[in-house]
Amino acid sequence: MKLALISDIHSNIEALTTALKSIAKQKVDRIACLGDVVGYGANPSDCLKLVREHADWIIMGNHDAAAVGIESLNFYNDYARQAALWTRNILTEEETEFLKTLPMEIDEADLHFVHSTPRSPKSWNYIFSLYDVTFEFSAVKGHTCFVGHSHVPGDYHEKDAKLGNQGKDRRIINVGSVGQPRDRDPRLCYAVFDSETRELQLVREEYDIKAAAHKIRKAGLPGFLAERLEHGW
């Protein structure tokens, strides 16, 4: 099975539409969305509609949870908090109820999908390095776990963590962010994975950042959220 994996769209319709056009050329069998469809950007409803139309699996992200009131905003910075409250007022009742029903994780054959980490999905911990991921491998259901959340792509193998895993090579792949990359590359990022060969491709595409940034400012959202799109951080 050839999979496309998208995550952290964050209400960026310009990035999402570009990503879906790119994915169409990949001839994938299925699409998985690893959460945070909404938050930060100016088009939450449009993005949610497209994801529901195209994704076979959708995971709940922390910003999805925050936008519908099931995740506390106490630990969010001012920019994220303002965006979450703004998004609550934009989403319809039906969209809100849909987001509330999203699962925290999904297992499919030897594949494991989660927004943050496999060991504790509800803690919203981040994976940025092999150090962060070392003790997550034991929680992987199957041979490969896909995550998002950090907005930074990465490919981590259990054998590299030197855990004495008796020949196992469980793998955790961070698929990056479609709508708000934070690896200082402003191009959108998504992943394509072949479940048979375990071959991974991280795809980067240019999109209309100026349009997305303009919409954020026009909506009255914090200007920082527009600026960071332009710098990939």
Image (tube, rainbow, N blue to C red):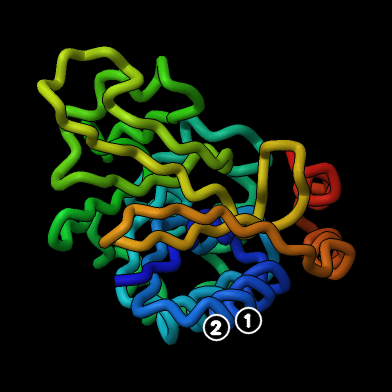
For the residues bearing labels 2 and 1, Cβ distance under 8 angstroms: yes
Image location of residue 40, percent across then percent down: 64, 54
* Quadrant placement of the C terminus: top right
Q: Secondary structure at mark 2?
A: helix
Q: Determine which of the numbered discs, if any, sits on residue 24 in the image.
A: 2
The local crowd at label 1, few if under 14, some if 14 to 19, many if 20 or more residues have their Cα within 10 Å, is few
Residue 93 seen from this side:
no
Return the residue nearer the eye: 142 or 195: 195
The tally of labels here is 2
Q: Is residue 117 above or below residue 141?
A: above
| Amino acid type, callout 1 | Lys
Residue 134 seen from this side:
yes
Image location of residue 173, percent across then percent down: 40, 43
Q: Residue at x 67, y 39 (%)?
A: 182
Q: Quadrant of residue 60?
A: bottom left
Return the residue nearer the eye: 19 or 84: 19
Q: Secondary structure at mark 1?
A: helix
Q: Residue at x 53, y 34 (%)?
A: 76
